Image (tube, rainbow, N blue to C red):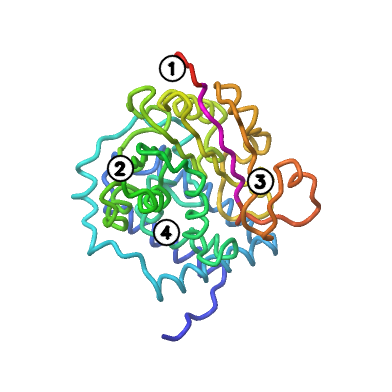
Amino acid sequence: MSSPPPLDLNFINTFLHQVWKDDLKVTPKQFQPIPSFDNHMDIVKEEQQIVKEDEASSRRTVLVNERILNLQMKNPTDFGGPIDWKFELSAFRVLPYPSYYTKPFHSIPGGWLSKFAAENNRIAMQAIYQDAHPEACEGVRKELSKFVPKSSTRIVDLGSGDGDGPAITARMFPSAKVIAIEASPFMIVCGRRQNRDCVNLEFHHQLAENTYIPSNSIDTVTVTLLLHECSNEGKRNILTEAYRILKPNGTIVLTDTPQTDLFTYRGFYEPWKHQWKDFNATKSLSNVGFVNIIDHGIVGGDGHVKSIEEHKETSVESTDNRLFVFTAMKKMKSSL
């Protein structure tokens, strides 16, 4: 199979604008962008204009899209057949989405509430994390799942997206029940299909800050690449919910992009990156009651593992294909 022709920013932007408009035609009104498609497009176009004026961001945007196109040609995501979106979405209710969630994340109208984002999430993650591990994002997810205690029999992943993260955990823990909490019905539709081999994985359509899971019932909670996309209030609420549902002595595995990495490039809109820059994982975990907090360093990128503080002090140019990892435990005796 021959390689696709080189891409340029104008072609990418024109193509994507048309795809998004076509997606809107099959998206029920209740799941369309809030406050409107046009409002989101204005934000996306502004971000795209900034990219055109920044050489490094232009190169990266083209590179990522070329990788995505190559992967789509060579190894497209297997959904087990065509998706009837109107039928699939009819099974979902509208959640009380907090305002921080209704943004055009990653320069996609609708953000996570998007057919385009859901259908392309697996391949996009493989493309972005291609240099972080020999197996790209899939390999990174396998490494992260190793932080889950082997004794875990009930595992919850908050903000699961298309569920590829908890699916890998479910495959590594075949005797455990793994619950993926996800607010986007689009992500759940794709996630169930592309991970249909995972019989011990189930998706719950709920907010990460209000899971409706009983208190003190979960062995391990994983939170991966979620908090940087939340307001400060959202972060606190999600960590509080994780603490509530964990059993005493239960473990949280918190993984996300290093704080300054979101400022390296433009092109994939991150509405909460300025709040994220000031995020302190140790303090945030401690504030909701977690103990035995361990900084496991940064995984990926240059291949070296360093602490968050060491990362902040380095003068080496950072990229967004790295992740920090923290683990912590719920107190043995807790009123929650």
Say left or right for 327 vs 209. right
Q: Which mark sits nearer the N-terminus, 3 or 4?
A: 4
> How far is mark 2 from mark 3, CA to CA?
30 Å
Find the residue positioned furthest to the front. Answer: 151
Q: Say which residue appears at 75% left-offset and 57% top-offset.
A: 317
- Judge the density around disc 1: few (<14), some (14-19), many (≥20) Cα neighbours within 10 Å: some
The disc at residue 203 is 2
Say which quarter of the image contains residue 182.
top left
- Judge the density around disc 4: few (<14), some (14-19), many (≥20) Cα neighbours within 10 Å: many
> How far is mark 3 from mark 1, CA to CA?
29 Å
Q: Say which residue appears at 65% left-offset and 60% top-offset.
A: 57
The disc at residue 122 is 4
Q: Which residue range is magenta in the image? A: 323-331
Residue 185 visible in the shown view: yes
Classify mark 2: helix, strand or loop: strand
Residue 63 on image: x %, y %? 58, 68
Residue 176 on image: x %, y %? 33, 43
Q: Amino acid at mark 4?
A: Arg
Residue 263 on image: x %, y %? 68, 48
Classify mark 4: helix, strand or loop: helix
Say left or right for 331 vs 278. left
Q: Which mark sits nearer the N-terminus, 2 or 4?
A: 4
Camera-near label (1 vs 2) is 1
The disc at residue 336 is 1
- Judge the density around disc 2: few (<14), some (14-19), many (≥20) Cα neighbours within 10 Å: many
Reply yes or no: does residue 327 show up in magenta. Answer: yes
Kindly identify which residue carries mark 3: 297
